[in-house]
Structure formats: C-alpha cells, structure tokens
Amino acid sequence: MSQRRSLLLAGALLLGLGVLAWQKAWISPVRLFKAPPEPRGDTVLFVVLDSVRADRSSVCGYERPTTPTLEHLAKEQGWSTACRAYAPGSWTLPSHASYFTGLEVPEHGAHSLAAGGQALGQNTSEQVRPLGPEPQTLAEHFLSQGYDTVSVSGNPVVSAASGLTRGFEEVRAPSRFGSWYGADLTRQLQHALEVGSSRDKPLFLFLNIADAHVPWGPVPNGLDWVPARPGLDWGQGTLWADFLGGRMGPDERSALLGHLGDVYDYGVSRADQTLAEALDLLQDWKRLGPGSRIVITSDHGEYLGEDGLLDHGHYLGEPNNQVFLLSSQGGPLLEPISALAVHGLLRDGALPEPLPRVRAAAFPHVQRSEWTEGKWFTRTSAAEWRADQKVMWSDEEGWTEGLVGKRSAAAPDPDLSVYVSAILESGSSVGEVDADLSEMLRAAGYMEE
Ligand SMILES: [Zn+2]
C-alpha cells in the first residue's frame, strides 16, 4: 500500500470515528434519521404530581397562584376535577402500586412495614416490600393492546427496583431526589420519546413530576407571591428532629413553618410549570389530540407542621392524604372520591363501577422513628371517608373525625374492621426483600443508613 493511500485511509477512518463520536455526544442518531412522528391523538397519559396537597393548589382554591396549568385545564378546558380525592396509600410506593394495579394497598402488599412489632430503624432493609409479579399493571395492559409504554419519573422510587415499572418498555428514573426537576425532567421525557415511541403505535406515557418533593430548592428573587428563601432539606436534620421532638420555642417553630410553607408552595408551582412544559413537548410531538386520555393526580400530600408532624409516609390525616384529581374524560367526579379511580379512567376512559371505597392504609414509616416515638410514624392506620366524616383507626383505637378536625371516639366500625384485618394480615409477614430497592430507598433518604 502506498504511503499516500495509507494516509488517505487513516484520514477517512479518523473522520468516521469523529463523526460517530460527535453524533454520540451531541445528537442522538435516532434524532438524525427519524422523522417526527405522525399525529396520533390517542395517547393515554398519566401524570402524578408527587407530594402535592390539594389545599395548597390554586386549582382547589388556595390563595397563592401555585397551579395555573391545572386551573387552565379545569376551568378553560372543562376537565372533570375533584379536590376531595384521597390517595390510597401514604407514600410513593403503595399509592403508585394501587394506581397501576387498581388494587388497595393491603391487596397488592407493596408498602413499608414493621415486622412483628420490631423497633423501627433496625433492620430496615427487611421492612420494605416491592410490587410483586402479579397482578397485571396498566403498562402491561396497554403493552398487550399494542401501545408503546414509557415511564419517566423524577422520583427514584418509580423504577425497576420497586416493581412499579413492570410493563414499561422504556423507563427513566434518577438515582436520587432533586436531580430531575423542571427542564431536566422534560429533557428526559424528550429522550424517552425519541427512543421509546414509534410513529405507528399509540402511546401510554406515565410521568411522575417530583418538583414538590423534598429536597426543597431555593425560592428565587422576583416572585410577587412568595418571598425569596434558601432551600431546605432533610439534611438539616436537627431542625426537623427538634420540631418533631417538641424542643422548639414558639418563635423558632413559627419561623421554620413559615419557611417550610414557602419553599413547599414554590415546589408545587414548579411542579405545575414542569407539567406545562411536558404538555407543550407532547403537543410539539403531535402526541396529544381530542382522542387523548389524560389523568392527573398526586400520590400523597405532605405534613407542614399539622398535628406536630412533618414529611409524608405516615398517618392518614388530611394533609397527607387529600389530593386533587383531574381527568380529560369520564364525566363528573363526585366527592369524596378515591384517587384509585384513576385506574379505570386510564384503562377504560370511564369511572370504575362500582367506585372504589374512599379509604387508605398506612404502615409504620421506616424513617426517623426515633424522633417520633409514640407518634404516627410507628403505627398501622386505616381511614375511610364517608361524606363529611371519616372513620379513623390506629392500632386498637378507633374514632371519627369531621372535616373541621373535630374528633370523637367511636366503636370500631364493622366495615372498617374487615379492611383493618386485611391490613394486619398483609403486614404480618415479611415478603421477599429486594436489595436494589433497599439501596435505592437508602440513597433517596427514605431509609436510615
Ligand atoms: Zn410520592
């Protein structure tokens, strides 16, 4: 081979490698060669705005303008809207498992639990159960109907380790909270659509927007409805421990709660903004149309000091369990309604018949129990809402509670007793524990080191 020819070959090879590297680094090959999808208006879209309380959402009357996108959908687009919807579980894993399977928490068994009354905080890796291989999930249903199935989550719990992504062909989730908020999440959505959706198939898309979940980032300057604030995270653990342990003076306590309320409200508004950006992206991709079926809800609320509690994942008072439910189809939503109804709305485009009971279960939370000995972190609880009254049960104790918080003792309710028995049964044995799930929860801050 002549020297000139060798040089030419080497040059061509280098050029080829350079183009490959450039494509890999900067432009996805899929984007280079794939034309935009043809319009397909029959997308089924399920959005969970993680940790968003109904009463802190302007679509449900909150005075701060936290959810303008939801307001637009409810008021201008005329979507069916319920502000007294109730999550079936008290944190991400049990509620999502219910939404995906259509089952109540004791039926699917994906939750955290304390085995045999052991002290929480010890052997926590044995106290979490992922969703098992049965029953069929929404994603498996749509996959069997010929859909592309895509899950993009800002919450690391919605990943393969928790069993929640069973049936999704394209799955995207971060390894920790706070890394995929806002534009980072919509970028992941765009990549997932590029790789996981095709022009000739309908799409089932699940989107978890976690901007309102801790860690709560700083509130920037320049908003006229909330003052600028530095961020707040569980890392500032002594603050939280002092609050939960009742070791704060009234001024310190009120300063903390003021700060919490502001950064949380800003988180809710960011979640609503991320939703707007995701809907815009889907419009650009021509994946939304009159035939689309879209349902938006939350998986639980958040304690912001009520009943002396912070965080979510425990106890079934209103702050942790009342969410909104918006649906583009399916007719009026009578309230109160179980958010479990999203399963039928998504699968069939109609409310399930009969409607699921408006009730929820909570199991002892695995985190920070030592701060809250004797409080709700350490109890198994059940609640059922009937019109304006809910029946509560925790351990051996039962009572009714009005919506205004008036509490009166009640004999254990026969209907609730059946549910409670199912809860105790589902929590009485420790199932297969997935090491990946434990590791992920620990990294996400749900479990102690
Ligand atoms: Zn959640």
Image (cartoon, grey):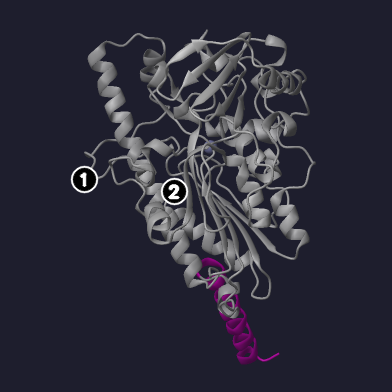
Q: Secondary structure at mark 1?
A: loop
Q: CA distance from mark 2 to mark 1?
A: 19 Å
The picture quadrant where one finds residue 105 is: top right
Is the residue marked by circle 2 packed among few (<14), some (14-19), or many (20+) residues within 10 Å?
Answer: many
| Between discs 2 and 1, the one toward the N terminus | 2
Residues drawn in magenta: 1-26
Q: Check disc 1 and give the amino acid type.
A: Asn
Q: Check disc 2 and give the amino acid type.
A: Tyr
Locate residue 262, reporting x and y percent. Answer: 29, 35
Look at the image and tell me whether residue 216 can be seen: no
Mark 2 and mark 1 residues within 8 Å of each other at the beta carbon: no
**Residue designated by label 2:** 181
Locate residue 268, reporting x and y percent. Answer: 38, 43
Q: Is mark 1 within 8 Å of ligand 1?
A: no
Task: Identify whether 53 is placed above or below 72.
Answer: above
Which residue shows up at 54% across the image and 39% down it?
Answer: 299
Magenta part, dominant SS: helix
Left or right? Give the position of 162 relative to 318.
right
Which numbered disc covers residue 221? 1
Which residue shows up at 29% across the image and 46% down it?
Answer: 65
Look at the image and tell me whether residue 67 can be seen: yes
The picture quadrant where one finds residue 359 is: top right
* Magenta-colored stretch includes residue 368: no
Locate residue 396, reporting x and y percent. Answer: 63, 8
